[in-house]
């Protein structure tokens, strides 16, 4: 039996409603899933009910964006930091925890400030669209959190780009002309909020930290462990088998738990539910760790 402990819904930037994920997971042969929407717990109750209806174990989660700078060694090229991504999964969190809610509200305000600025920059680059079009798209999709994927979707619908990925690479990704960096949490704040909510703090898709070598990767992982990190997402759709092995070994050295998931976003990405074939024992071990910690 398998589990998938990294999934998204329309509560953030996925295309499937939270309540439908259980049935989709059941059809894929999974026994447990986690919903880990970006900076929000809005979909957790609906997803939990959907899983209960079909007999799937459910892990309430979140994916919190944080600033990678505090856990990366000084770089010769400061611009390289802009391409790094640090996301921290919270697994087994309480959906209504006050500290986690405060983090969610802070990140939503930062995102709402950034989005119109991205549109302004796109207009300067000759991309004719306005924020109202993005809001209309998100409303039609039932999305609570509006972010860059929705801007990219409007760009694609209007023929400016060929795909969501194309929009990020050419315009709104970290190297694009319309990129705007938003407020980021110190990773300590993210980890502490997850712990306050009773959850485990897990480094998501560590390959996106873009560590240049083994020493830099070890440095980053140790820094996060010192801040209270509980585990590493070793299995992920962006990880090669060689990377999985490296992350598993380093997690063992640092006495960190391991987890895995597809990072499913529905039709927004070409990633299937359960594609990482994470053994159900991973979920069971994490559940036990959360209970005893």
Image (spheres, rainbow, N blue to C red):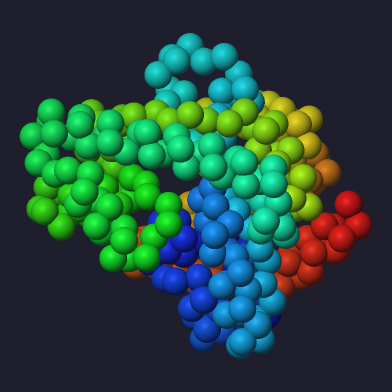
User: Is residue 251 found left or right of 130 in the rendered image?
Assistant: right
- Image coordinates of residue 271 in percent, x first then y, are 42, 65
- Residue under the point 11% across and 39% down: 127
User: For the N terminus, which image quadrant?
Assistant: bottom right
User: Is residue 174 found left or right of 33 in the rendered image?
Assistant: left
- Image coordinates of residue 293 in percent, x first then y, are 88, 52
| Foreground residue among 98 and 177 | 98
- Image coordinates of residue 39 in percent, x first then y, are 54, 47
Asked if one can make out residue 5 in the rendered structure from this viewpoint, the answer is: yes
Image-quadrant location for residue 64 = top right
Q: How many numbered circles does the render carry?
A: 0
| Foreground residue among 261 and 136 | 136
- Residue under the point 73% across and 67% down: 283
- Residue under the point 63% across and 73% down: 48
Residue, far right: 292
Image-quadrant location for residue 265 = bottom left
Identify whether 53 is placed above or below 262: below
Identify whether 7 is placed above or below 164: below
Identify whether 120 is placed above or below 63: above
- Image coordinates of residue 119 in percent, x first then y, are 22, 37
- Residue under the point 78% across and 60% down: 286
Asked if one can make out residue 216 in the rendered structure from this viewpoint, the answer is: no
Identify whether 96 is placed above or below 192: below
User: Is residue 18 found left or right of 230 in the rendered image?
Assistant: left
């Amino acid at each position: 039996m398998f589990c998938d402990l990294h999934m998204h819904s329309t509560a953030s930037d996925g295309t499937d409603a939270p309540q439908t994920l259980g049935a989709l997971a059941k059809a894929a042969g999974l026994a447990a899933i986690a919903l880990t929407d970006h900076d929000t717990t809005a979909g957790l109750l609906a997803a939990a009910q959907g899983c209960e209806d079909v007999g799937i174990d459910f892990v309430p989660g979140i994916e919190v964006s944080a600033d990678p700078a505090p856990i990366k060694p000084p770089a010769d090229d400061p611009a390289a930091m802009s391409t790094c991504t640090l996301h921290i999964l919270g697994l087994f969190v309480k959906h209504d925890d006050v500290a986690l809610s405060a983090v969610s509200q802070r990140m939503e305000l930062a995102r709402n400030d950034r989005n119109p600025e991205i549109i302004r920059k796109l207009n300067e680059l000759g991309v004719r669209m306005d924020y109202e079009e993005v809001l209309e798209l998100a409303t039609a999709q039932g999305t609570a959190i509006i972010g860059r994927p929705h801007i990219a979707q409007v760009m694609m619908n209007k023929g400016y780009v060929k795909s969501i990925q194309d929009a990020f690479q050419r315009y709104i990704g970290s190297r694009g002309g319309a990129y705007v960096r938003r407020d980021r949490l110190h990773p300590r704040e993210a980890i502490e909020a997850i712990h306050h909510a009773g959850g485990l703090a897990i480094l998501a898709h560590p390959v996106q930290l873009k560590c240049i070598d083994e020493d830099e990767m070890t440095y980053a992982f140790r820094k996060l462990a010192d801040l209270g990190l509980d585990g590493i997402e070793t299995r992920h759709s962006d990880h090669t088998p060689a990377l999985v092995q490296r992350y598993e070994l380093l997690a063992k050295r640092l006495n960190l738990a391991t987890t895995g998931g597809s990072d499913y976003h529905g039709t927004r990405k070409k990633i299937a539910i359960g594609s990482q074939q994470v053994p159900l024992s991973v979920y069971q071990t994490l559940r036990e760790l959360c209970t005893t910690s």
